[in-house]
Amino acid sequence: MTRTARRNRRTLRMAGAGAAALLALSACSSSGSDSSSTTSDSAGSSSDKLSGTVTVFAAASLKESFTTLGEQFERAHPGTKVTFSFGGSDSLAASITGGAPADVFASASPKTMKIVTDAGDASGTPATFVRNQLEIATLPGNPDKVASLKDLTNPDLKVVLCDKEVPCGAAAQKALEASRLKLTPVSYEQDVKAALTKVELKEADAAVVYKTDVHAAGDKVVGVEFPESADAVNDYPITLLKDAQHTDTAKAFIALVRSAEGQKVLTEAGFLKP
């Protein structure tokens, strides 16, 4: 074989080896891409693994915003369901410590949350997710010209307050005490929605409720702000409960409540950021 022929043969062998190497690299790259895709798909489907029903016990003032968040959660996680029990925080806390099945508790005050934590029924440390401020709800058009908290002491007015054991009632008492005012309501209601309903049905002339409730009522009532409410702002804590049946799903709902998306829904409803 001539020198030229041997050189050509060597060149062909090198070209073949180079092609094989390129094929190997291509295979590795393709394999890496598939692995990455699989990892991505796996991560994307991890949220889809959430399942089961989450039972949330929440303060009555959270009804509208939490209902919206529950619907958003169910859309984002097919196969899950969020059910709610809304009411006075004190009665909800008593139900939880009494053994009522629930996964999440959202209270309208740290005091009522403490009932649950002291009983050992909370899992982890409750976190404040919003705050709420009081406002006076009056009849449409405000026919009695209510302009201040002091105006509610007029004996000719039928005024409703939340029960003193309920966070909105405790906050109202704190505001009254700060103003050195005494007010005798025609009734004490078990939660803030019940107090507001009295005005909506025109069974009362005014009620001290939360700004969020006035906002939710629309044109059924007129809201009157009063400066003393700044001395009685309520923090709202939320916690996972010890006996939660679907822990991951319950945690995911709490995460939504505390997320930017959840905060947007809550602040649009009139809540204050924590």
Image (cartoon, grey):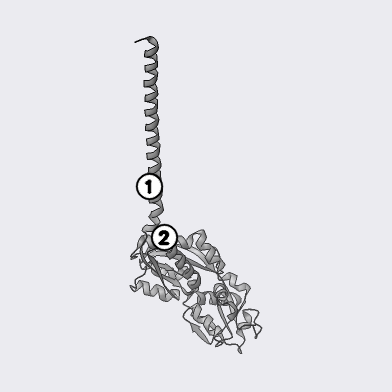
Pinpoint residue 118: horizontal percent, then vertical percent.
38, 67
Residue at 39 percent of width and 14 percent of height: 7
Residue at 37 percent of width and 17 percent of height: 10
**Which picture quadrant has residue 231?**
bottom right
Q: Nearer the viewer, residue 2 or 171?
A: 2
N-terminal-most mark, 2 or 1: 1
Whether 193 is drawn above or below 19: the answer is below
Task: Identify which amino acid the numbered label 2 is placed on.
Answer: Ala
Pinpoint residue 222: horizontal percent, then vertical percent.
61, 79
Q: Can you tell which of label 2 and label 1 is closer to the viewer?
A: 1
Pinpoint residue 188: horizontal percent, then vertical percent.
50, 83
Under circle 1, the secondary element is helix
**Which picture quadrant has residue 2?**
top left
- Horizontal arrangement in the rendering, residue 258 relative to residue 12 (left or right): right
Crowd rating for badge 1 (residues with CA inside 10 Å; few <14, some 14–19, many 20+): few
Quote the CA–CA distance across marks 2 and 1.
24 Å
Residue 80 got which mark?
A: none
User: In the rendered image, which residue does mark 2 sit on?
Assistant: 252
Crowd rating for badge 2 (residues with CA inside 10 Å; few <14, some 14–19, many 20+): some
Does residue 97 appear in the picture of this structure?
yes
User: Which residue is farthest bottom?
Assistant: 156
Q: Nearer the viewer, residue 83 or 23?
A: 23
Residue at 63 percent of width and 72 percent of height: 227
Task: Identify which amino acid the numbered label 1 is placed on.
Answer: Thr
Residue 38 got which mark?
A: 1
Pinpoint residue 113: horizontal percent, then vertical percent.
43, 68
Image quadrant for the N terminus? top left
